Amino acid sequence: MTATDTRRPEITVLTDEQKSRALEEVRRRAGTCSSCGGEQFIVGDALYLGFLFVSENLDAYMVALTCANPECPAPRRGIRLPASQFL
Amino acid sequence: MVVLDYPAWLRIEHWVNVLFVTLLIRSGIEIVATHPKLYRGNDSRPGAEWARFTRKTMPTDKLYDTLDEEESYSSLVSLPGHKNLGMGRHWHFVTVIGWILVGIAYYILLFATGQWHRYVPYSWSIFAEAWNDILTYLSFKLPPLLPGEPLDAIQKLTYAGVIFLLAPFQIFTGAAQSPAVEAHFPWYVRLWGGRQTARSLHFFGLLGFVGFIAVHLTMIGLWGWPQLNALMIFGQARHLGWALAASLAIVAAIVVVHIAATVWSLKSPRSVQRALGFVINHGRLVALRPMVSRQRYPQSALSPEHRVNGKPPDSDDYKVMAVHHFVDWTLHVGGLVEHPMTLTLADLRALGDKQTQRVLHNCVQGWSSVGEWGGVPLRQLLELVKPLPQARHICFLTMQDAGRDEPSAEGAGQFYEVLDMSLARHPQCLLAYEMNGAPLPIEHGAPLRLRIENQVGFKMAKWISRIEFISDYHAIGQGMGGWREDNVYYDKDVEV
């Protein structure tokens, strides 16, 4: 099993710059981990929500965040961002 | 020499046929309404339809599904009308059972009594005579009857065509749309040029019957409604006044049956589902349940686009899981099993060699596609969890909330479907986590969906989160064996 076998077709891989912009937005919103309260995150990929989900605005994305706290019991989180704020 | 008169059995069968054929036409239109587009081959790619009976246009920037494309037709043309596919299917299938039985009896009696002479041509010259008859009708005159026969040449050929060609054609093209038949005899679908070609041909057959009825009624009007109805009611051209009244009474009775079926279906669909489903299911389980899928479509047959029925779970939990490639998703398997367990996607992938199957998908609405699915055979999971002897069904619970996720759905609540244990060990009963060589797309049920290839698509639950082995399903939901069965009155066992 290779890593590429499990990559989802809907996922948008973000560049470092896009990840930085997303992280800035997390900090601007004072985002914290709802599991451990941690404030440090690692930004991952993005999922375009606008096409797939009924309630979502057309420019909405879910950006993957992983809580940087190694003790966090549920580190995988996400933040909903409009495309203009990070892409 | 057989006297080609009107024996009682022929008269009774005629009027029963009028009822059955008209019920089949109206319920058939109801079924067409649910996906009012016709295609060729096996695919139903958007935009590839050669005919459409809808003015709806679908968005390009938002996922739409085939529930959004459904049309609501009037009860005047469809049974029962108003977007009731479940009811339309029940009426179509119960009527077709009756129609086939009556048809078999008709054929037997036709040949046993010698009455087949009225329909079967004796010589090629009848075609020339039939052409002359058409010209005669076009000059607003009546052609002569064939010597010693009750019909003229064109009538004889037309009846022969309807009885010996059109009626079997409808049954055979109908059978070509059964997922069980298609799964067990893939060559049979090819014979018709593909699932969608069979559906299109079936539609032409419907038009054929509608055209025949229109011309038939016109002919009776031209030749003498009272006389011909006297023959078809009393067996002799006498009591013409009574014959006229009786014919109108019979037609009125048939209309009353249609109205009653429509009102019953619209007012009390659950009782229709139970009553007609009881009849249909027994026939279906005997005739079609044994048909195990053995499909192996070639790579070249894969559909370029696979339509969607049902929208993904519109919850933050699901979206966060999805953006993390479903690493946190778990499948709970429990209920009547020796070893309940919780599996991650990685666990499922590690269970054994991935099984792939390239198969024809049949949506209950009538569209179809060929897809390749990869995953774990359900029987492999059964070996792990070891169902207890009293486990008779498997309930697949999903992350979809129909009320939240599917504005076009008639109903709310968590989507689930129940499968009989007997289907779980079918070789192509699969828990699929891949489609066409890639991870299962979100709109097709990521991270896990069911594939059971001799059933209609809605049984193949998508976005599965839990599997429960159960002894009885009547306490789940509204007790009918699945969300669609509960809310839109589909049948639980859907080999057709």
Image (cartoon, grey):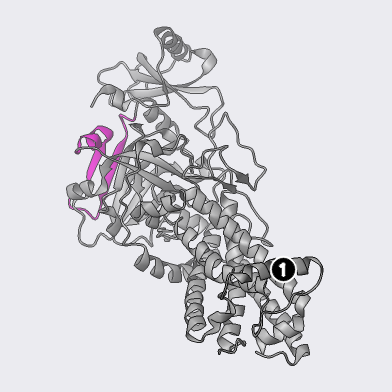
Identity, as a three-letter code, of the amino acid under mark 1: Asn
- Residue A66 visible: yes
Residue B426 position (above or below residue A22): below
- Which of the 4 image quarters holds residue B80? bottom right
- Judge the density around disc 1: few (<14), some (14-19), many (≥20) Cα neighbours within 10 Å: some
Relative vertical location of residue B369 with respect to residue B100 in this rendering, above or below: above
Quadrant of the frame with the C terminus of chain B: bottom left
Seen from the viewer's position, the closer of residues A15 and B73 is: B73
Q: Quadrant of the N terminus of chain B?
A: bottom right
Q: Nearer the viewer, residue B263 or A82?
A: B263
Residue B30 appears anywhere in the view: no
- Which segment did they paint magenta? B326-352
Question: Quick check: is B234 in the magenta stretch?
Answer: no
Give the x, y percent position of residue B81.
63, 59
Q: Position of residue B35 (x, y in %)?
A: 56, 48
Q: Residue at x 45, y 34 (%)?
A: B304
Report x, y in % for residue B397. Answer: 37, 47
Q: Is residue B59 above or below residue B457?
A: above
Magenta residue check for B350 = yes
| Quarter residue B205 falls in | bottom right
Name the residue rendered at 72%, 67% in the picture: B134
Residue at the disc numbered 1: B132
**B359 displayed left or right of B93:** left
Considering the numbered disc 1 on the image, is that residue within a helix, a strand or a loop? helix
**Dot 1: chain letter:** B
